[in-house]
Image (cartoon, rainbow, N blue to C red):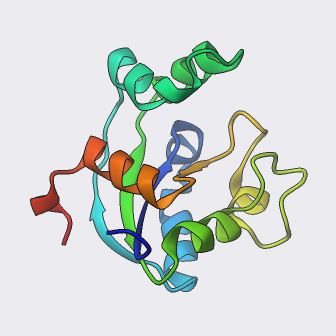
Amino acid sequence: MAGNRTLTIVKPDAFAAGKAGKIIAHLEGADFKVVAARVMHLTTVQAEEFYGVHRERPFFRSLVTFMTSGKCMPLVLERADAVAELRTVIGSTDPAEAAEGTVRKLYAESKERNAIHASDSDENASRESRFFFAESEIL
């Protein structure tokens, strides 16, 4: 998986606003292939486990609350240099600082309600993908 696959999540703000399809189309337009996807509503336990690396950060509790506020859509994406390319395509965490044409510039509401999650390393992409999908579900 390293190098060619990454995990993204269409977050509850974008999913509830009906932007999931536009975001996926944007990613596919950037040569990403969807190899696994599901719609789900994270429980508090799941969100705390997934974002556990941020447990000591001041935004942890609000992040968990946000990520459990509605349905989200985890996806495994595939393309060359997937992690780095996805982070370029989605843009800066703060949509006010994101480059024109990036997912967050187009679809995010704020720094906290920023439409999409992206893995930050090949190692985390692998771990995060396994959090949501069994290997047999990744086509």
Position above or below: 92 against 55: below
Residue drawn at 37 percent across, 46 percent down: 128
Quadrant into which the N terminus falls: bottom left
Q: Nearer the viewer, residue 69 or 79?
A: 79
Position above or below: 124 against 71: below
**Left or right: residue 53 compared with residue 132:** right
Residue drawn at 56 percent across, 64 percent down: 23
Residue drawn at 54 percent across, 73 percent down: 27
Position above or below: 82 against 118: below
Instruction: Indicate the position of residue 114 as horizontal and vertical percent values.
Output: 68, 44
Label count reads 0
Instruction: Indicate the position of residue 18 as horizontal and vertical percent values.
Output: 53, 52
**Residue 56, picture quadrant:** top right
**Residue 34, picture quadrant:** bottom left
Q: Nearer the viewer, residue 44 or 130?
A: 130
Instruction: Indicate the position of residue 65 as horizontal and vertical percent values.
Output: 54, 17
Residue drawn at 59 percent across, 39 percent down: 13
**Left or right: residue 55 compared with residue 2:** right
